[in-house]
Image: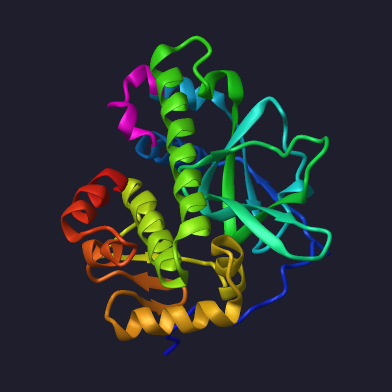
Amino acid sequence: MQTALSQPSPRGSDHGCVPTVASSAGDAEKAILLYLARTSGAGPATENDQSALAEAVTEVVAFDNNRSLAAFPLRADHRYVVIEGWAYRAHTLPNGLCQITDLFLPGDCFGRIETGWHEARPVLRSCGRMKVAALRQEIVAGQDIVSLRARWGWLRDANARVLRSRLISLGRRDARERVARFMVEVQGRLNAVGLVRGGAFICPLTQEQLADIVGLTAVHINRVLKRLRDEGLLLVDRPRVLIPDTTALNAATGFPPSIARVHEEKVA
């Protein structure tokens, strides 16, 4: 039995990467339900929301693990909702170091990387086998429907909160606190779309990818995961992750237990 995420693996090659375009009403419906669950903080969904989003879906695309999503021509006038698997946005510096800045989990929405100047070379990659649904942006963003516009704004605010929390972690939390906070974040996001069972969820990240998110080395990640396991706070048997007590793990990030419980409710 593995007790930590897998050892570092190459960041991947796109040789032979052929995305599969599928037309599945079931997948399209699942994408809509996941998106509505992810944005439930904006309020309950209406029948009008669901029917408008159903009309917005133009196709469903499947990707193999660790592939560049640029292998499929992502359209500027579309947004892509994750149905299965994960995706991430990474930036590679001239010295070869990589920082993963964004994670897209089921129910999350992303667009293509715009061309132009970037401080570090950006890329969108799949993490695990994944499916995404393409939706017309003007409908998802609520150009003509106020309730969808509110959902779009809520999701943008939620993503900003996640990025601010990661910035705090990178700047002020130690290695153990960074990993603990990240795992609490992921559990909360997956719980919102019904993908957590008994505190457990599926995490396809390798140690190298986790290191690129929290700004550590893969070797350091391995030590931190073992420490959290020994403390009974985090159990990893890749790809399954179990958090026995979310409040306790949240408290390990520096939150007093009483504040951790309140924060946990807000995240989930």
Residue drawn at (60%, 51%) of the image? 101
Left of 177 or right of it: where is 27? right
Query: Residue 80 or 24: which is nearer the viewer?
Result: 80
**Residue 6 seen by the camera:** no
Task: Say if residue 170 shows up in the picture.
Answer: yes
In front: 216, or 124?
216
Image location (x, y in percent) of residue 72: 75, 45
242 to 16, vertically: above or below: below
Return the residue found at the far bottom: 1
The residue under the point 66% across, 58% down is 99
Report the number of numbered marks. Answer: 0
Foreground pick, 101 / 48: 101
Q: Residue at x 55, y 24 (%)?
A: 56
Q: Residue furthest left?
A: 258
Magenta-highlighted residues: 39-49
| In the image: residue 84, left or right of residue 33 | right
